[in-house]
Image: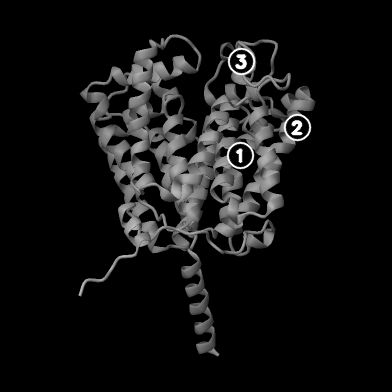
Amino acid sequence: MRTAIAPADFQAMLHGRSSLPRAECIPQWPVTFATFHNQWMPALIVIAAVLFNAVLAILNGHFVRVNQYFVVGTELLLVVTAHAIALSNFRPQMLRWYILIGALFAIAILRGLVLQDFDAKLFRDVLLIPTFILLGITFKPRGLPTLIVLLVGIYAVFMVLEAVNTPAYASLFKIQDFYIDTRGFTEANFWNKDSPLFASAIRPDGRFLDIVELHRLSSVFLEPVGSETFCIIVWTFICTCYNRLSRGVLVGLFITTLAMIVGTDGRLALVMSGIILVLCLIAPRLPRALSFFYLPSIAASVALLVYLAALRYDIDDFGGRLAFSMHLLGQFDVAELLGVSNTLLRPAADAGLAYLILSQSLFGALLLWSFISLGSRQDTLPQIRYIHSTCLWLSLFMMVGAAFLTIKTAALLWFIYGSLQRDETPEAAAALAKGRRDKDDASN
């Protein structure tokens, strides 16, 4: 006798999920340090990763000279500590990410052997992704709102300081000295001799969002691109987990993040915020595998746009950056696709997709993207929304930059990704709670 399939189950089969998530009646995640109980260390590592550049800038400007090796050493310490925490709290779902690390390391070794030059930075760039996903898996997601509110609060304090008293902000961080001492910059890189801020803090053609008469605010990120990326990450979290947040927290984060976007003059963040909002509303109805196709689809669309609009890659504006990214990809030969050429590596630093292929090979880039887009649970609404929205905005972002590979933004982005993998459906959460109660009863 043939069993009838319910319409909802049939639709779920078409969408590639065991079941379509419904509106979840799970208690809201409170904003209180009590949610950090027994998981303070993962939270502190992420906070340190987001803020360590700002702290080192203060040290460099007022106490002790910091060099590039000091910065690398600090990053290495954070990464090693993150893995120590992950391994001491090992869960079966972590294994796939350690397999990915092994594969990426093998690619880095092979690339180094072919070129007779092992570049640790190229491996470090992609190592940050699985590292902070693994760290996130050790962190229960109910602590995420507290972490986000804390980081946004710190960001907002220094954003206000920068807006109200720019000389005091510049004097505190001495941003140009920090980048000259630690990143190999020279005074020539800071074209505006009247500004003590990062070079891109002032657009030559003025602000895009001219609601306020300010430079592009950077706050604790010291430069506007990192600041803008942080805004996108926070906005993604808000749209992903809005039904887990109290009304006061939701409204507060919403207003503050919009103010941050205006402050940093984030034209890309402004566009992304609208796209992410719409996508999060429809994500539960989208096929699971669709997140993988965002990147190739957007790359093909941008290439078509550049061709039809005859965009020039030698003009320093948004269209020019899109054209430059496509120009670099158009210059790829077999060696570039195999990741065994450094010819275009330096100019590709501001073209995320090209940089990823050049540093990891086409195979490595596809492998990494497959793990991110397809290799994780999509059982709850926050998981589905976060994976879809992150894959979409990263695909767009990779057409114009590679800031998502720096630890000050990558840490929070992938930590949230990993932590949400701990999220459970109402049924699973109830089953786990019942199992714990039964275990306690049996022990008594």
Using the numbered discs, state the Cα–Cα distance from disc 3 to disc 2 in whole angstroms: 20 Å
Q: Residues within 10 Å of mark 3 (few under 14, many from 20)?
A: few
Residue 170, horizontal then vertical, whole percent:
72, 24
Q: Earlier in the sequence, mark 2 or mark 1?
A: 1
For label 1, the SS is helix
Q: Residues within 10 Å of mark 2 (few under 14, many from 20)?
A: some
Which residue does the image show at 55% across and 34% down from the upper left? Answer: 274
Q: Amino acid at mark 2?
A: Val
Task: From the viewer's side, name the closer residue of 233 and 63.
Answer: 233
Q: Earlier in the sequence, mark 3 or mark 2?
A: 2
Q: Does residue 73 appear in the picture of this structure?
A: no
Which residue does the image show at 46% across and 69% down from the upper left? Answer: 428
Above/below status of 343 relative to 372: above
Label of residue 148 in the image: none
For label 2, the SS is helix
Q: Which residue is mark 1?
A: 52
Using the numbered discs, state the Cα–Cα distance from disc 2 to disc 1 in whole angstroms: 20 Å
Which residue does the image show at 72% across and 30% down from the upper left? Answer: 62
Q: Earlier in the sequence, mark 1 or mark 3?
A: 1
Residue 90, horizontal then vertical, whole percent:
43, 62
Task: From the viewer's side, name the closer residue of 313 and 96.
Answer: 313
Q: Amino acid at mark 3?
A: Arg
Q: Amino acid at mark 1?
A: Phe
The N terminus - image quarter: bottom left
For label 3, the SS is loop
Residue 429, horizontal then vertical, whole percent:
50, 69
Label 1 close to label 3 by CB (< 8 Å): no
The C terminus - image quarter: bottom right
Using the numbered discs, state the Cα–Cα distance from disc 1 to disc 3 in whole angstroms: 26 Å
Label 3 close to label 2 by CB (< 8 Å): no
Q: Which residue is mark 3?
A: 203
Q: Which residue is mark 2?
A: 160
